[in-house]
Image (tube, grey):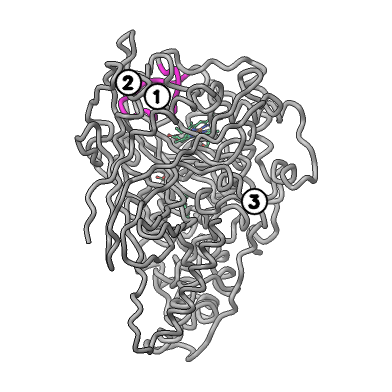
């Protein structure tokens, strides 16, 4: 179990040296300005480094371009909807509506996911159901999805190419003015990798800057106690910063599985009804909850785990006392658990000027 | 002790490099590969068996498996001829269902010869309490750390699945093996911990001849966790086993017969 990133980066650099030699309208030997991700020390010290593909290094110009594209409705078929239309910065880049609405006015069938700490999704399975195998791959989806931006890539490429600003920005970011879908997804992915959230009340408590209230402290105990919450086996614990395992589980929501989730992707009946565990960071801003946004409040979520569990064949074995609906938390444990969960929210993330709509 | 051997190794390596173009032939040292397989009383457990195949444990309960993950560490080779100990301080987390890390090459090279091969199930206290922990174990699929109120460190093992209980209900179980931790009162809290006991244990595979390329199969008979010497009654002990001191001591007892040497190929 060795960390090979050192070796990879050498390969990567060698690769760069060789790769800048074909193609037409480009700036020979141009190298955009490398940009280090601004990673919290606690992340560096406790988990693996962020996943940055060899062929898409972070650069100042790439991130700036990605951010502009993220907030630009030019990507959608009728130029009315941008990524932020469903991934709103003030909601930790999620959507307060249960189902987002695409340009056709049609509702989707899943709740838009928050976008935070995605560079740390080490297994690189994206979306609720793991249907995308990298961030870059994920980006291809929304632009052409008929219930989202409903555009075609050739149309996107042509519109961007014709614009007065984009060719220059692509030149600065990638050394070529020839715009294609791959470069668009690369730029937006670079921006999304900068969306790191690591400054919640709980982070500051771990850093000995502040203390928790007795309620929050007891809530953490409930969260960690196998006989009560036992949330940590899927959502993590104080020694790790992500608050998700980024793995797939059935957490007992439905007796009859209608959305097969991961099972749709793998075709394996053992994966029917499995969804990726969301991070519990920023819950204060990301309601409604679950893949279909069925719960409007954290109280409902906690009630679900406490007494609302239902059995289906693929239910995760970590779910306890399923025949009774759950372990039955006391009202005060429930309130404390909620207080603890909210301490994982990071106001500086949603107000970070680097992440706001450019004017 | 381990440090001395490592030093010795370093010196040896340094010497053997110097000798590269000498006339005296010094044998190059070899690394050793391990392959980890799982079975239920001899019946191989494959990916397709998870959640599908029903096994009957020693106590008579029908059960299925969803997850079998275990941590092995300190792979050690002791020379049969002169007693020299070659200790790799490496560790490997086997994720059996996904077939991840089911082959592993400890970070150590040893001369050809006959060795007693051993490893530790889980982490001994020295490894478990390593300052700063392990970034890779903190990043695996399925949380591996143990909450501080249970003594911290890492899980040794997570076996999860279902069994049919005495009331004929399909019931989830979590057979989680960790360092035994005893509490004044349960549920555990920040001030309840009164004793920690290292329940990792050494597994000795016996003697193996190491050549230039060697692969050692380590078999794990999962049924033994529920069998010997303690017949495990899942009806009584199926969940919340992490802070259950006696359950952890009993797992250690049962663990002694789980692992055995399988095929050795050169």
The residue labelled by disc 2 is B163
The residue labelled by disc 3 is B131
Q: Is residue B241 left or right of residue A334?
A: left
Mark 3 element type: loop
Q: Is residue B27 left or right of residue B122?
A: left
Residue shown at the point (52%, 64%) measured from the top left:
B6
Q: Are marks 2 and 1 in contact (CB under 8 Å)?
A: yes
Residue shown at the point (54%, 67%) measured from the top left:
B7
Relative to B218, residue A307 above or below = above
Viewer-side residue, B174 vs A98: B174
Examine the residues drawn in magenta and state their main secondary structure: loop
Q: Residue furthest front?
A: B82
Viewer-side residue, A28 vs B165: B165
Q: Which of marks 2 and 1 is nearer the N terminus?
A: 2
Mark 2 element type: strand
Q: Do the residues labelled 1 and 3 touch (CB within 8 Å)?
A: no
Q: Is residue A160 found inside the magenta-colored segment of the image?
A: no
Disc number at residue B260?
A: none
Mark 1 element type: strand
Chain to which the residue tagged by mark 3 belongs? B
**Boundaries of the magenta span:** A308-322
Chain to which the residue tagged by mark 2 belongs? B
Relative to A32, residue A339 above or below = above
Q: Residue furthest top?
A: B167
């Amino acid at each position: 179990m060795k960390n090979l990133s050192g070796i990879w980066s050498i390969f990567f650099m060698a690769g760069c040296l060789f790769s800048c030699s074909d193609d037409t309208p480009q700036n020979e030997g141009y190298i955009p300005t490398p940009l280090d991700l601004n990673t919290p020390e606690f992340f560096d010290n406790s988990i693996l480094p962020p996943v940055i593909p060899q062929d898409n290094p972070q650069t100042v110009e790439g991130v700036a371009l990605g951010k502009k594209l993220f907030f630009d409705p030019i990507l959608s078929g009728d130029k009315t909807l941008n990524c932020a239309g469903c991934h709103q910065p003030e909601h930790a880049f999620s959507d307060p509506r249960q189902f987002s609405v695409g340009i056709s006015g049609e509702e989707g069938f899943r709740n838009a996911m928050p976008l935070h700490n995605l560079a740390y999704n080490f297994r690189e399975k994206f979306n609720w159901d793991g249907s995308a195998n990298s961030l870059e791959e994920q980006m291809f989806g929304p632009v052409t999805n008929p219930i989202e931006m409903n555009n075609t890539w050739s149309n996107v490429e042509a519109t961007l190419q014709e614009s007065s600003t984009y060719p220059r920005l692509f030149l600065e970011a990638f050394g070529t003015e020839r715009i294609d879908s791959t470069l668009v997804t690369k730029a937006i992915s670079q921006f999304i990798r900068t969306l790191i959230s690591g400054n919640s009340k709980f982070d500051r408590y771990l850093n000995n800057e502040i203390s928790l209230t007795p309620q929050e402290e007891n809530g953490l105990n409930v969260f960690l106690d196998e006989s009560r919450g036992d949330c940590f086996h899927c959502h993590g614990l104080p020694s790790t910063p992500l608050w998700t395992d980024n793995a797939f589980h059935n957490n007992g929501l439905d007796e009859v599985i209608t959305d097969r989730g991961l099972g749709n992707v793998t075709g394996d009946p053992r994966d029917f009804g499995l969804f990726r565990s969301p991070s519990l960071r920023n819950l204060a801003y990301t309601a409604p909850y679950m893949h279909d946004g069925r719960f409007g409040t954290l109280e409902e979520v906690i009630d679900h785990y406490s007494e609302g569990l239902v059995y289906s064949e693929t239910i995760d074995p970590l779910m306890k006392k399923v025949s009774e609906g759950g372990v039955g938390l006391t009202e005060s444990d429930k309130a404390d658990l909620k207080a603890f969960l909210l301490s994982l929210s990071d106001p500086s993330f949603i107000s970070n000027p680097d992440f706001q709509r450019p004017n | 002790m381990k440090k001395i051997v490592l030093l010795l190794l370093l010196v040896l390596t340094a010497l053997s490099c110097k000798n590269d173009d000498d006339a005296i032939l010094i044998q190059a040292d070899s690394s050793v590969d391990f392959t980890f397989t799982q079975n239920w009383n001899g019946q191989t457990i494959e990916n397709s068996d998870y959640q599908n195949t029903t096994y009957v444990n020693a106590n008579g309960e029908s059960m299925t498996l969803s997850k079998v993950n275990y941590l092995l560490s300190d792979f050690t080779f002791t020379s049969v001829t002169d007693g020299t100990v070659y200790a790799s301080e490496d560790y490997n987390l086997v994720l059996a269902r996904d077939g991840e890390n089911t082959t592993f090459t400890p970070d150590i090279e040893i001369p050809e010869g006959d060795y007693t091969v051993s490893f530790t199930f889980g982490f001994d206290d020295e490894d478990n309490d390593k300052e700063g922990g392990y970034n890779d174990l903190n990043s695996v699929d399925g949380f591996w750390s143990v909450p501080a109120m249970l003594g911290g460190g890492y899980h040794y093992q997570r076996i999860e699945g279902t069994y049919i209980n005495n009331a004929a209900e399909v019931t989830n179980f979590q057979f989680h093996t960790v360092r035994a931790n005893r509490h004044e009162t349960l549920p555990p809290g920040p001030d309840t911990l009164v004793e920690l006991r290292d329940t990792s244990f050494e597994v000795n595979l016996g003697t193996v001849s190491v050549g230039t390329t060697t692969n050692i199969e380590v078999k794990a008979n999962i049924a033994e966790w529920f069998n010997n010497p303690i017949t495990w009654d899942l009806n009584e002990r199926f969940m919340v086993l992490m802070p259950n001191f006696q359950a952890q001591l009993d797992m250690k007892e049962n663990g002694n017969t789980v692992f055995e040497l399988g095929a050795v190929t050169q």
